[in-house]
Image (cartoon, rainbow, N blue to C red):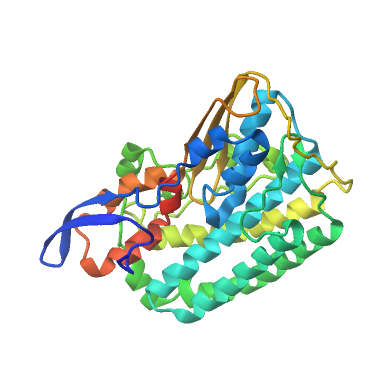
Amino acid sequence: MLDPRLPGPMEMNLTFEGDWVQTSTVDFGFTTRNLENKIQKARWDAGPLFASKIDPEAGFFGEQAFVMALENVMGITCDPSTEFVRTIFSELSRVSAHLRSVAYLSRVVSIDTAFHYLLREREKILDLFELATGSRFTCNICRPGGMNLEVTQGFLERVLFFSENLLKSLPEYHLLLTENRSFKKRTQNKGVLSVAEINELGLNGLIPRSAGVVSDLRISKPYSAYREVKPTSVICPESICPQGSDTYSRFWIKMVEIQDSLELLIQLVEKSPRQQEKRVTFLQDLLVHSGSGMAEVETQRGVLKVEVSSRGESTPLTIKINTPSQLIAKAIPVVLKNTREEDLSLILQGLDFSVLEIDL
């Protein structure tokens, strides 16, 4: 039976001294999907759909990374309209994932009001995905050089309406959680990772930012419309967690990134080219010439890297996927050392890793 304190199908072996964890080991592989092998054996036109299942909570990042790597193999570029639409979907996925993560963290500490309100806001993003693509999670819309749909002006107006309204509601959620004394007491100094430990583990993305380290691919190596619209370099002030990165600082970064992404969405909609991108579809007999390509995208957790090679046939030669959760999993034994048993679910939820991202 799956322990309710665990975020997914996994096995933890813990040794205690009283109520304090001394050592821990983690085993995965209970939901292994063999996703890389499936993509390798599938035709090119099925690749984006399989890639969108890398992380079911933010499927767009997977298909975007796969298609960008494929574009590098083919040597093609996208028109500005496509780049803006991809970036809009990326930021919507980021906000959706952060809302879910914060909602489940609030449930762990028994603040049910925030849990229901945050999931309600997330449902509005899923409604936008369904409106544009017909699917709420696996969009399957990225294609080499373009998209498999025409985003209407009405959809962009709905994105703008949602972003402006959630920005107005964020202060209420800060009162419920960020400034909540009991929430702070429950999450501060829990699951601490020092900057030295973060660097030793090679972590990137949100966890280093929660320790005050700048680590954002959208800024260091801008891609898509991030070349035109720059996100804020969000890092956690040292005053929040002087020791490095704890559960509260990771939560704090997510809340600030939600606001940053909403402001980015408003800019993207306002600056998006008005002409419609051409519909681009995969053909059943699509052949990609021989070569290899690699792409990296900044997901809600960190850097997702996809490497693709082709031998000039209708299926890939090889594909390699590196996910941020695979790195976060290595930090679990470090972050759980000398913590209380009652804090296990809190710390694991605050790390925000996906078992499905690990069990590819």
User: What number of labels is visible?
Assistant: 0
- Quadrant occupied by the N terminus: bottom left
Q: Along the horizontal axis of the image, is 204 left or right of 221? A: left
- Quadrant occupied by the C terminus: top left
- Residue at coordinates 33% horizontally, 61% vertically from top-left? 347
Q: Quadrant of residue 188?
A: bottom left
Q: Along the horizontal axis of the image, is 59 left or right of 79? A: left
Q: Nearer the viewer, residue 88 or 52?
A: 52
- Residue at coordinates 53% horizontally, 42% vertically from top-left? 216
Q: Quadrant of residue 289?
A: top right
- Residue at coordinates 69% horizontally, 39% vertically from top-left? 224
Q: Residue furthest right?
A: 275
Q: Position of residue 287 (x, y in %)?
A: 70, 25
Q: Along the horizontal axis of the image, is 262 left or right of 358? A: right
- Residue at coordinates 48% horizontally, 66% vertically from top-left? 102
Q: Nearer the viewer, residue 329 or 53?
A: 53
Q: Residue furthest bottom?
A: 113
Q: Position of residue 76 (x, y in %)?
A: 74, 27
Q: Along the horizontal axis of the image, is 73 left or right of 159? A: left
Residue 109: tell me if it is visible: yes
Q: Position of residue 135 (x, y in %)?
A: 67, 59
Residue 222: tell me if it is visible: no
Relative to 198, residue 31 above or below = below
Q: Position of residue 270 (x, y in %)?
A: 80, 54
